[in-house]
Amino acid sequence: MDALAELVDLARRLGEPSGAMAILAEGNVSARRDDRSFWVKGSGKVMERASAEDFSLVAYGPILSLVENREHRPEDTAIREALNGARVAPGPSPSTETLMHAWLLGLEGVRFVAHTHPVSLLALLSTEGSEALAKQRLFPDEIVLCGPESCWVPYRKPGLELAWAIADAVTHYHQRWRERPKTIWLQNHGLITMGETAAEAEAATRMAEKAATVWCRALATGRSLRLLTEDDVRHIHTWPDERVRAEMLRRT
């Protein structure tokens, strides 16, 4: 299956209403085609009903030049013109969040990026103190598929400002863990996952939402939570057996 076909399938699976990951035109996904271009969902397209015609093939160069030039913040109309002008084939207008997709697809080991708005996670992201929750883990499989902690990004307007904030947060995360994050929490906004395969991005999305549901139910009891310690997290994160299992799940 080629990258576009995998991307269409990923969009449909994450857009299924029963999963509560994205409804209507929420969310977007992308996939690297080659070193010069990538596929990204068109603006306003519904993931649940995605087809190949709902994706735009976009050149990296013009998009990355916007993200990497922080000395100049173009007007929104200029950004939209740049996004439309970056298309290398006929297609819909690329999503506003194409900017963050272009930057993330340049990370080592990333061929697919998924951005969703899972219900339980969004509930957590809309509460005070959710930044602290991003750094904590409740059970082993959350570590295996979502990473030792989630990369936290404070709320920014979608588009260029959000892409800048994501780049800063991911860079800081890499300095701390010496690897890219598997999950990114966007305050009052949603979730980003990524991976070498569509399966890896989907698995991280589903596990992140399960973890958020566990958080919500545990907090609702009003009782004290037993969090995994830093030693617990590092043990699971570096345990060879779990790395093998994660690799198997990534390709499932």
Image: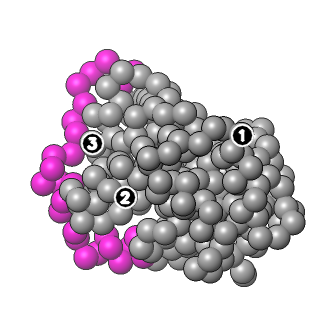
Residue type for callout 2: Pro
Position of residue 50 in the picture relative to residue 146 (left or right): right
154 over 7 or under it: above or below:
above
Q: Which residue is mark 3?
A: 136
Q: Is residue 66 magenta?
A: no
Q: Relative to the observer, which residue lies in front, 239 or 57? A: 57
Which portion, as a residue range, is magenta?
219-247
- The residue closer to the viewer here, 60 or 175, is 60
Amino acid beneath label 1: Thr
Q: Residue at x 15, y 50 (%)?
A: 230
Which color mode does the image show? one colour
Residue lying at 71% horizontally and 62% vertically, measured from the top left: 86
The spot of residue 34 in percent (x, y) is 62, 80
Distance CA(mark 3)–CA(mark 1): 40 Å
Characterize the local packing of mark 3: few (<14), some (14-19) or many (20 or more) Cα atoms within 10 angstroms.
Answer: some
N-terminal label among 3 and 2: 3
Q: In this figure, which residue is indicated by the disc labeled 1?
A: 77
- Residue 130 in the image, given as x and y percentages of width and height: 36, 30
| Rendered position, 92 above or below 23 | below
Asked if labels 2 and 3 touch by Cβ distance under 8 angstroms, the answer is no
The residue carrying pointer 1 sits among few (fewer than 14), some (14 to 19) or many (20 or more) residues within 10 Å by Cα, namely: few
- C-beta proximity under 8 Å, tags 2 and 1: no
Closer to the camera in the image, 244 or 10: 10
Q: Which mark is residue 181?
A: 2
Q: Secondary structure at mark 3?
A: loop
